[in-house]
Amino acid sequence: MAGPATPPSGAPYVLVFTEQYNRKAARFLKRHPELRQQYLKTLQVLELNPTHPSLRLHALRGKLEGLHSVSINLSYRITLELLIQDGQIIPVNVGDHDAVY
């Protein structure tokens, strides 16, 4: 895993990107270059305030129990591991509803 161990000043959480996620994100952005700005904005808001209403953060159930999901827009989501105690947010997958669930 890459990323700093402690959140940078000003951000209460730190995003920790795995190689696996980085590959998924690169594929997603290659397929949907028009969503790059929305995707980056989603990550910025997530780092500053994971409970911001625009993200529509919610816990997942079933086979994805233990993960959460945030919205990039109405069609696309990022699933993530939310480790509140360590201040870490680990993105797991990005894509449309069917791809991430």
Image (cartoon, rainbow, N blue to C red):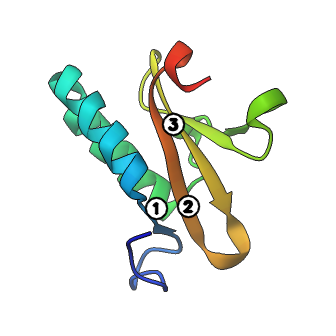
The correct choice, above or below, for 69 with respect to 83 in the image is above
Does residue 39 appear left or right of residue 77 in this picture?
left
Q: CA distance from mark 3 to mark 2?
A: 17 Å
Earlier residue among tags 1 and 3: 1
Q: Indicate the amino acid at tag 3.
A: Ser
Q: CA distance from mark 1 to mark 3?
A: 13 Å
Query: Closer to us: mark 3 or mark 2?
Result: 2
Which label sits on residue 47? Answer: 1
Label 1–label 2 contact, CB within 8 A: yes
The residue lying at 24 percent from left, 39 percent from top is 26
Secondary structure type for disc 2? strand
The correct choice, above or below, for 9 with respect to 96 in the image is below
Earlier residue among tags 1 and 2: 1
The residue lying at 49 percent from left, 38 percent from top is 93
Residue 88 image offset from top left, x and y in percent: 57, 69
Residue 5 image offset from top left, x and y in percent: 48, 84
Q: Residues within 10 Å of mark 2 (few under 14, many from 20)?
A: many
Q: Indicate the amino acid at tag 1.
A: Glu
Q: Which residue is disc 2 drawn over?
A: 89
Q: Which residue is disc 3 drawn over?
A: 54
Q: CA distance from mark 1 to mark 2?
A: 8 Å
